[in-house]
Image (cartoon, rainbow, N blue to C red):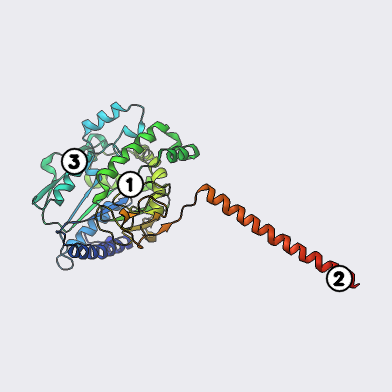
């Protein structure tokens, strides 16, 4: 498991991000006299970006008895896909929404099962937890949840939980913003009916409400170009078929499959890339209890909890960024009202303020221009009289 991948920048930077914040997290809980609790890391990355391999490698390094000797649990949002029967029902109940005809989109996961799993992992009275598992190769690539007898059982006490998923950190847009983006869309988003996108956007609300508050820190493998996703996912499918001897999907099936994900990247990556997981939306969305410099829910509030790693087509890190917990200065609620200078503050001018500022600048420029012309004319008259 500890291959050359463990030496890649995404592994090294992610490892340091986790260790740095976990130390601060433990100190924070000790000072607040709070009981021990696993440190939870949310990991996001599009299909084929290497997020699963990253988490597996991090778990191996953190588990190593000669270095950190930590008990690490890693699992995926994919493990909570609906069963084949339930996915078929979802598709049947939404015949006009192509995005819900296959697994993957918000709405195709058993969030109650995911929430129950997290709560069990955090319950000090529960000494072992069975982690659900999903077989993507079943039913010719349509997939199905594995039988409970095949689920992995983990044993407490847990030090770190790594939870990864392609749509982790995607947050619902205000409906007006969604409609604006759709009206201006030129990519794959424009190929879907607006009603289908509105349904997916609505479904995201439940993901944020049920899961996001669990995360103490966040790591995002961000594609330099979302078009990289197809080749990454194709490589992933070929590897699965070669190593596991399963049927899987054809190349055309993979392209059609990835096409259903592209509208979500077009809609939700901009916010995640600009303000991060813990930042406030730039459209003035109300702060959630887990967002902002100082979490209102009492959770870990370290500075720059989000690590963004931008990958090129070969999955090489070409840029990294520790993102501040951005808020708007005129937001009705800044991190629960406790006050903090840790976050990045963005001033949001209203339309009236921008108009007045523009008028002021025009006035000043006109004044200085008039004054300069007056001086030139006076000088010319003096010169003429002297002659």
Mark 2 lies on a secondary structure that is: helix
Image location (x, y in percent) of residue 235: 33, 48
* Residue depth check, mark 3 versus mark 1: number of the one nearer the observer: 3
**Horizontal side, residue 266 vs residue 210: left or right:** right
Image quadrant holding the C terminus, namely bottom right
Binning the other alpha carbons within 10 Å of mark 3 as few (below 14), some (14 to 19) or many (20 upward) gives some
The residue carrying pointer 2 sits among few (fewer than 14), some (14 to 19) or many (20 or more) residues within 10 Å by Cα, namely few
Residue 15 lies left or right of residue 176; in this view the side is left
Residue underneath mark 1: 47
Alpha-carbon span between mark 3 and mark 2: 90 Å
Quadrant of the frame with the N terminus: bottom left
Residue 304 position within the rendered picture, expressed as x and y whole percent measured from the top left: 33, 61
Q: Label 3 belongs to which residue?
A: 113
Mark 1 or mark 2, which is nearer to you? 2
| Visible residue check, residue 379 | yes
Relative to 10, say whether 261 is above or below. above
Identify whether 137 is placed above or below 243.
Answer: above
Q: Which residue is mark 2?
A: 383
CA distance separating discs 3 and 1: 23 Å
**Residue 120: x percent and y percent?**
14, 47
Left/right of residue 163 with respect to residue 172 in the rendered view: left
Q: Which numbered disc flags the more N-terminal residue, 1 or 2?
A: 1
């Amino acid at each position: 498991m500890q291959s050359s991948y463990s030496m890649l920048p995404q592994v090294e930077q992610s490892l340091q991000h986790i260790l740095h914040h976990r130390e601060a997290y433990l100190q924070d809980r000790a000072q607040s006299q709070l009981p021990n609790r696993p440190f939870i890391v949310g990991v996001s990355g599009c299909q084929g970006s290497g997020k699963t391999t990253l988490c597996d490698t991090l778990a191996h390094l953190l588990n190593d008895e000669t270095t950190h000797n930590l008990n690490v649990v890693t699992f995926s949002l994919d493990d909570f896909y609906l069963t084949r029967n339930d996915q078929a029902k979802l598709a049947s109940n939404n015949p006009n929404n192509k995005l819900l005809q296959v697994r993957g989109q918000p709405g195709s996961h058993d969030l109650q099962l995911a929430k129950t799993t997290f709560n069990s992992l955090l319950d000090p009275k529960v000494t072992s937890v069975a982690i659900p598992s999903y077989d993507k190769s079943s039913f010719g690539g349509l997939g199905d949840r594995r039988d409970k007898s095949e689920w992995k059982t983990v044993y407490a006490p847990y030090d770190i939980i790594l939870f990864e998923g392609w749509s982790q950190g995607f947050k619902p847009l205000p409906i007006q913003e969604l409609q604006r983006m759709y009206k201006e869309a030129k990519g794959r988003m424009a190929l879907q009916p607006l009603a289908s996108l509105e349904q997916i956007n609505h479904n995201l609300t439940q993901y944020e409400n049920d899961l996001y508050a669990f995360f103490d820190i966040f790591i995002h493998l961000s594609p330099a170009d979302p078009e990289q996703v197809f080749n990454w996912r194709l490589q992933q499918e070929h590897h699965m078929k070669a190593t596991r001897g399963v049927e899987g999907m054809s190349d055309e099936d993979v392209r059609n499959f990835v096409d259903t994900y592209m509208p979500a990247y077009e809609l939700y990556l901009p916010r995640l890339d600009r303000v991060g997981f813990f930042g406030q939306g730039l459209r003035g969305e109300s702060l959630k209890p887990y967002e902002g410099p100082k979490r209102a829910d009492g959770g870990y509030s370290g500075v720059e909890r989000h690590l963004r790693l931008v990958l090129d087509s070969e999955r090489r890190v070409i840029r990294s960024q520790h993102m501040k917990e951005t808020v708007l200065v005129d937001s009705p609620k800044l991190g629960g009202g406790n006050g903090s200078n840790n976050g990045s503050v963005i001033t949001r001018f209203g339309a009236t303020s921008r108009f007045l500022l523009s008028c002021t600048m025009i006035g000043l420029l006109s004044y200085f221009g008039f004054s300069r012309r007056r001086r030139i004319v006076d000088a010319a008259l003096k010169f003429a009289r002297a002659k």
